Amino acid sequence: MEKHDVRRNLLIVDDEVDILQSLRLTFVKEYEVFTASSGVEALEILAIQDIDVIIADQRMPGMTGAELLERAVQISPNTIRIILTGYTDTASLVQAVNKGHIYQYITKPWERQELKLVIKRALESYDLVLENKRLLKDLQIANERLSTENTILKNAVAKEWRWGEVIGSSLAMQAVIEKVNRVTKTPVTVLLTGETGTGKTLLARHIHYHGPRKDKLFVEQNCGTLPESLLESELFGHKRGAFTGAIQDRKGLFEAADGGTLFLDEISEMSPGLQVKFLQVLQEGQFRRVGETEPRQADVRIIAATNKDLWVEIENGRFRSDLFYRINVIPISIPPLRERLGDIPLLADFYLRKFCEKFSRPAVGFTKEALSALIEYDYPGNVRELENLIERALILSSDAQIDVGEWLPTLPPSSRNLTRLEQLERAEILRVIKLCDGNLTLAVKELGISRTTLWRRLKYYKLLHELQPEQNADVSD
Ligand SMILES: Nc1ncnc2c1ncn2[C@@H]1O[C@H](COP(=O)(O)OP(=O)(O)O)[C@@H](O)[C@H]1O
Ligand SMILES: [Mg+2]
């Protein structure tokens, strides 16, 4: 309790000098005693002096004790208010007591010791009340903090990060993964671009959780879901009272991500005004909570993502080129799934196993036709769409083999544009098979890949029909 070892201030109010004198003697040893001979004088003292307890006589000319104490509530609400009164006056005080203007009344004549005890007890219980109030407030603030941090943590855990799940055997994806692996070790700013569902969020997490910051928070914010002012306070925090509803100081995601990573998704949606502020933060390495003037520091690694072409956004005046150059330190662009067909069988297989496990179903596979249909589809929603498709396929079919069926989307198949590198790979495979006279065992050796990989490649490039039937059986076993 804060004030115990300090002398407490007592104000005694009575129009009779003798009584003032005798009360002063009663208390002067233990308390700092102030005296006033009228209500008006008492109010003047209250206005300039911290008073812990006020003891007022009820019957005084001019202002009565009860009137004084009622006005004292306004000036000094925390002061304990005690009244001295004759037996006959108690009835008139009931109302004042009930309204809380008076803490306690003491009837005349009083016992010195009793009066001392009353004051002591009053102070003790009042201290407890104040202490409780303060603790309660601290608790509320702590709760609020915890709840912010809790949301962030939940956010991170709910996305149930599992290791090593970035799948991709296509050359295009191998190049992406290689680039990603190179940036994980350094705190350099990364800009991930790619259509929705291509794995931007997955890769951002991968970068964080494989790097030296993995034990600090990975904090994620979509720039397209909040209006400018809310986004600013979400990112940088705010001072209590900075705007309506800002009832507490609040830490922003920037501070929460100190030592960790802040992933800004849909960066193209950040408003021009906030883009200016954000650029400043990146340049100065400092930020300000909304409503604060003192800058703060946080060591945050930034990963940004967008599914838009930022060049187009810059051209149309929606995105600042200076901010673009600041975040485009290491650009990583993830090709759409339809441009890396080689990943489809792997991903399909991965998700099939994942959903079998989730639904506690025995392992199943795809028929050849189903697999070709999967490869031929063009996936406007990319890997996310493939994932949903596989889940639907599993739910809709109860057989051990999933065949073509109503789960397949009805959109037109892709034109199967192979990338330049894939064209080269396809040509190389054909060349080696011809070179080996169709001997696949030799071809596998010559290509330096496994039989399974060769089979996948042949299937992917629709080359299986070029083999003799017995060779076909030979590779796929
Ligand atoms: N290369 C990949 N390997 C495994 N899963 C992937 C891959 N790319 C995307 N996914 C999965 O596809 C879904 C969509 O990916 P996400 O990262 O949310 O895409 P984006 O952020 O680009 O919209 C997620 O479930 C993600 O785990
Ligand atoms: Mg995403």
Image (cartoon, rainbow, N blue to C red):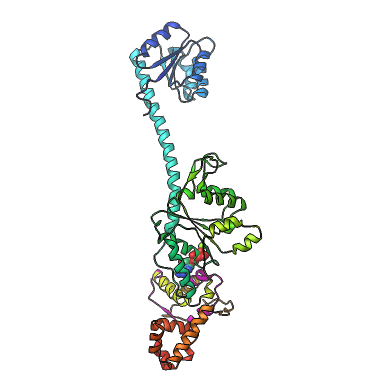
Q: Quadrant of the N terminus?
A: top left
* x and y percentages locating residue 22 in the rendered image: 39, 8
Query: In the rendered image of this protein, does residue 226 appear above or below residue 124?
Result: below
State the residue at coordinates (54%, 71%). Answer: 336
State the residue at coordinates (59%, 57%). Answer: 269
Q: Tell me if residue 146 is in the magenta stretch.
A: no
Q: Nearer the viewer, residue 344 or 64?
A: 344
For residue 425, side relative to residue 268 (left or right): left
**Does residue 148 show up?**
yes
Report the span colored magenta.
358-387
* x and y percentages locating residue 383 in the rendered image: 50, 70
Query: In the rendered image of this protein, does residue 75 appear above or below residue 302?
Result: above
Q: Tell me if residue 364 is in the magenta stretch.
A: yes
State the residue at coordinates (54%, 78%). Answer: 420
Q: Nearer the viewer, residue 54 or 231?
A: 231
Query: How many marks on residues?
Result: 0
* x and y percentages locating residue 266 in the rendered image: 55, 59
Query: In the rendered image of this protein, does residue 209 appear above or below residue 469?
Result: above
